[in-house]
Amino acid sequence: MPPHVGAGVEINWGELERAWGTPFPDDYKEFMRNYGPGAIENFLAVFQPGISEAGLPEGYMADETSVAQEVWEDLGGIPGIDAEPGQLLAWASDGTADLLFWLRGEGSPDDWPVVVYERDEDAWNLYDCGMAEFLVGIFRAQFPQHPLSGTPMWGTSAPRFLTAAEESRISAAGRDPWS
């Protein structure tokens, strides 16, 4: 999945991690450096954490994290997994409204598993891998079953990524950015 020209963002991770009160996994930091926020296959939106002028978390990542924490509390999380709602941190959502999170725990953020909330099923599923490994697993169809409700990325040998700005630029030129 080669990034397009102009993809990627420089982020002051120290400032961001202080504002969010948490470190972020290295594979996510690398993804942001190379790709930035945007969409994979016009299906999966990867969030960038934001900070308000008051120095507080804001944006899609903050909003979806808050929603997930409420749903985790309401549904009781994953049976057999002892975790508090505050341990969830959203990093993406898909075109079927599934949400993707890290389940933060003790130790390195590189060891945080991915959790998927399937809204249609009202179900949580845990995947013992990080963000990059999870995405590669979808692209290579390596999971016993597809972890998301939709399948546009499942078994995709050449996935495409576009930032929102690149998608808008292509659309403004009168072309479908995803064709």
Image (tube, rainbow, N blue to C red):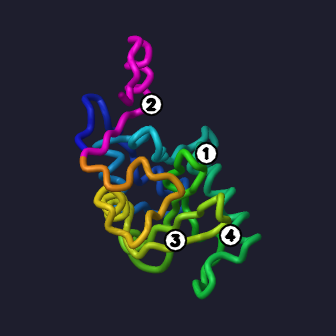
Sequence-wise first label, 1 or 3: 1
* Separation of residues labelled 2 and 1 (CA atoms): 18 Å
Q: Is residue 103 above or below residue 54?
A: below
Sequence-wise first label, 4 or 1: 1
Sequence-wise first label, 4 or 2: 4
State which quarter of the image contains the N terminus: top left
What segment is highlighted magenta in the picture?
158-179
Q: Residues within 10 Å of mark 1 (few under 14, many from 20)?
A: some
Which numbered tag is attached to residue 72? 4
Residue 100 among magenta residues: no
Q: Nearer the viewer, mark 1 or mark 3?
A: 3
Sequence-wise first label, 3 or 2: 3
* Separation of residues labelled 3 and 2 (CA atoms): 27 Å
Q: Nearer the viewer, mark 4 or mark 1?
A: 4
Where residue 24 appears, x then y in whole percent? 42, 60
Using the rendered view, name the quadrant where residue 21 is placed.
Answer: bottom right
Which numbered tag is attached to residue 164? 2
Using the rendered view, name the quadrant where residue 40 is placed.
Answer: top left
The residue shown at (63%, 69%) is: 123
Residue that mark 3 sits on: 103
Q: Is residue 66 left or right of residue 179?
A: right
Sequence-wise first label, 4 or 3: 4
Residue 71 is at least partly visible in this image: yes
Q: Are marks 4 and 3 in contact (CB under 8 Å)?
A: no
* Separation of residues labelled 4 and 3 (CA atoms): 11 Å
Q: Are marks 2 and 1 in contact (CB under 8 Å)?
A: no
Identify the secondary structure beneath mark 3: strand
State which quarter of the image contains the C terminus: top left
